Image (cartoon, rainbow, N blue to C red):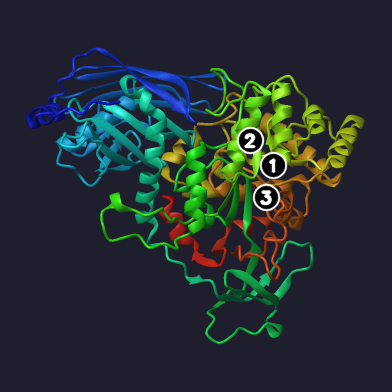
Amino acid sequence: MLKWVRVPAFVAAAALVGLRQPPAPQALALYLLGHRIGTEQYTLGPDSLSSRFEYLDRGTKVALDSTLTFKSDVTPLSFEAHGKSYRYFSVDASVPRASGAAGTFTIDGMAPIAAQGLLIQYWLGHGRPPAVRIEPSGDAVRVAEAGGHASAAGAQPRFRHFTIDGLIWGREDVWLESATMRVAIVFTSAGVLPFEAYDAQYESLARSWRRLQMPMALGAAQYDQHALRPRARGDFALVGGRVIDATGAPPIEDATVLVRGGRIARVGARAAVAVPRGVPAIDVSGSTVLPGLWDMHAHVGQPEWGPVYLAAGVTTARDMGGEFDIVAALRDAWARGGEAEPPQTARDALPPASLVGPRLLLAGLVDGPGPASFGHVTAATPDEGRAVVRRYHDAGFQQMKLYNLLDRPTAAAVIEAAHAAGMTVTGHIPNGLTLRDVVEMGMDHVAHLTVRDTPGSEAMRDTIAFLRAHHTVIDPTLSWNELLGRSAATPIESFQPGFRHVAPPLQRLIAGASGGAITPRQAHDRLARSLAIVKALHDGGVPIVAGTDKGVPGVSVAREIELYVEAGLSPIDAIRAATAVPARAMGLEKDSGTIAAGLRADLIVVDGNPLERIADVRNVRLVSTAGRLYDAPPLWAAGGFR
C-alpha cells in the first residue's frame, strides 16, 4: 500500500519552477492493453530531458529517442524526437531552436511520456493559459487540473491529477507526484489503443488504478457530450427520401419511415404511411435513408470514438479485442445513450456515465502467454482457455477472439467452451495453424484477408467451397491494408477524402503510416490482388463483412464499402456488407441491419444516391441510433474532427 505523506507547500512550489530533481536515471513501465511491454528510460536534469522510449509490440520493436532542453522556467529551447511511437507510426520531429513565444511548448504526440510532465509544469508556471501552442505541430493543447486527488484521511494528496486534451486524439490523464512534480502515472493511447505508463515505484498499482480511471474518464466525457441532444427521440418520421432497406429489394422513392418508441413502425411510400399527430416529421426529400452502418473490426479505446462513429453513420461496431475494463465500460455508457442527466454537483459525484455512441458488440481477446503476447488476457492451457471464456461470457461479450500465440489444444478448448456458452469465435489464425485448421476446429469468423490463393485457380475454388460449406465469415479490412500498404508518394486524401477533416493529432499520426519504399504501381497491384480475392469470395457465397481495424475512425467504413465496389461488388451488395450481412453474422438480423417494421431504428440519411455513386455513403446528414436522431455536424465536432 502507498504511504501518504505531508508535503510542505514551499517544496511543491519550488518544484514547479526550479525542477529540483537530481539528474539521475528514471524509468516508466509501459503497458499496451494492460500488458507490460517495455520501458521509458529517461534522465531529467535542471535544463534538459533525454529519453529512450522502447517496447515490444507483438514481437515488433518500437523505439523513440528524444531530447528536450529548456530554461529554468521550463520554456523549451530545443527538441528532437526520432523513431516510432507505435509500430506503424513514425515520429521525426526536429525543433533546433524553439520560438520561446509565450504559451508554447515542444513535444510531438504522447512520447516521451516524461515530457508530458514538463508540459504540465510549464502550464502551471506560466499562469495556466487556456491553451498551449505545440511546436512543431502548431496544435493548441488544453491542460487542466482535475479533481480526484489520491489521498488518505488527514494527509496531503500524494498525486496531482491533470488532463491533457489535444496532444493525441482525445484526452489523456496524467498524475504527477505532488512533492517532485515528476510523472507518476499516465493514461494515453498508442496507435489508438489504450496505453499506460507507471513510474517504477507505482507499477504495483496498475490493475487497481486502471479500474479507478475508467469511471473518472467516462464521467468527465459525459459533461463534454451532454450538449449533444437528439433532434428527435423515440418517435419521429423521415419523410420524402429514397429508402434503401438493404434487403436487396428495389429502393422506395418518396418514402416515409415511421419510428415509434425507438423501433421502426412502418416503412413505405409516403402516400401509404400516415404520420400520427404529434410525431415530428423530418423532411429528407432528395436524400437517401439507409440502415445504420456496421464496423465489424473496431478497436475502440476512448469516449471520442462514439460521436465520430455516429457522425460517419456507424450505429453498430464490433470491438475486436480491446482492454477488458475499457470496452465493457464504453459499451454500457453508449447503451445508456444520453438518457441520464449529469448532476449539478461536483464531478466526483457522477452517476454511471451516459455517452453518445453506437451499439458496441464485444469480442474477448485471448492470446498465448509471453512478452510478445497481445493484451493482458492470456491462456497457456485448455483449462486456462476455458476460464477466460467464462470471464468474457459473464461480462456479456458475444464472441471470443483468438490471437497468434495460442497453441492448438488451448485454441480448441476456447472454441469448444465458447460454442457451449452460446458465443461465436473470430480472430487471427494462431501460429502453426492454417486457415483450414481453425475453420475445421470451429472458428466461425476470420479476421483480415488470410486467403492467399490465386484468383481463378483450382486452389482458390477449393478454398471458397471449403469456407462456404463451413459458413465462415471473412472481414478483410481492405481499407486498413490500403492505408498501410500505400506508397509514401500517394497522398491519403487521394483515396480517403474524409482524411482532411480528421482531428489534427490523429491525422499526423496516421499520415506517418505507409508501405515504405513501395512504388505507387506496386501498391496498386497488391491492392488489386486483394480486391480480386474479395470478389471471388463474395461470388462464391462466402459472407464478407465490412471492418476497418485501426484506420480512420468512422471514416474508413465508407472507404471499405467503396473498395468492395472497386472489387466488382454491386453497390447494394457493398452496402449489405456493412448492414444486413454483419447483422446476420452476429445473429441479430431480427433486430437490425435492414429497414423493416419491428427492427431497431438504426438509420442514416445521406445526401445523394449511393446506388448510383457509392461515395455518397460518406455524405451522412442525420443518424438515428435506437431511435435517437442526431445531426451529423455536432457529432463530428464533439469527436474533435473538423
State the CA–CA distance, disc 2 to disc 3.
32 Å
Count up the numbered dots.
3
Q: Work out whether mark 2 precedes mark 3 in sequence or the reverse, and give the earlier one.
A: 2
- Inspect the image, locate mark 2, and give the three-letter code of the amino acid beneath it: Val
Dividing the picture into quarters, in which one does residue 322 lie? Answer: top right
Say whether residue 50 is left or right of residue 485.
left
Q: Mark 3 points at which residue?
A: 561
- Inspect the image, locate mark 1, and give the three-letter code of the amino acid beneath it: Ala
Q: Is residue 449 visible?
A: no
Which residue is pictured at 9% across the width and 29% down the height? 8
Look at the numbered discs 1 and 3 and tell me whether their residues touch, using CB distance below 8 Å.
no
Looking at the image, residue 9 lies above or below residue 303: above
Look at the numbered discs 2 and 3 and tell me whether their residues touch, using CB distance below 8 Å.
no
State the CA–CA distance, disc 2 to disc 1.
8 Å
Disc 2, SS: helix
Q: Which residue lies furthest to the left in this view?
A: 10
Which disc, if any, is residue 389? 2
In the rendered image, residue 146, in percent from the top left (x then y), is placed at 26, 44
Q: Give the camera-side residue of 625 and 522.
A: 625
In the rendered image, residue 60, in percent from the top left (x then y), is placed at 55, 19
Say whether residue 203 is left or right of residue 56.
left
- Inspect the image, locate mark 3, and give the three-letter code of the amino acid beneath it: Ile
Q: Dot 2, crowdedness within 10 Å: few (<14), some or many (≥20)?
A: many
State the CA–CA distance, disc 1 to disc 3.
33 Å
Indicate the quadrant containing the N terminus: top left, top right, bottom left or bottom right: top left
Q: Residue furthest right?
A: 458
Q: Name the residue under label 1.
A: 421
Look at the numbered discs 2 and 1 and tell me whether their residues touch, using CB distance below 8 Å.
yes
Dividing the picture into quarters, in which one does residue 241 lie? Answer: bottom right
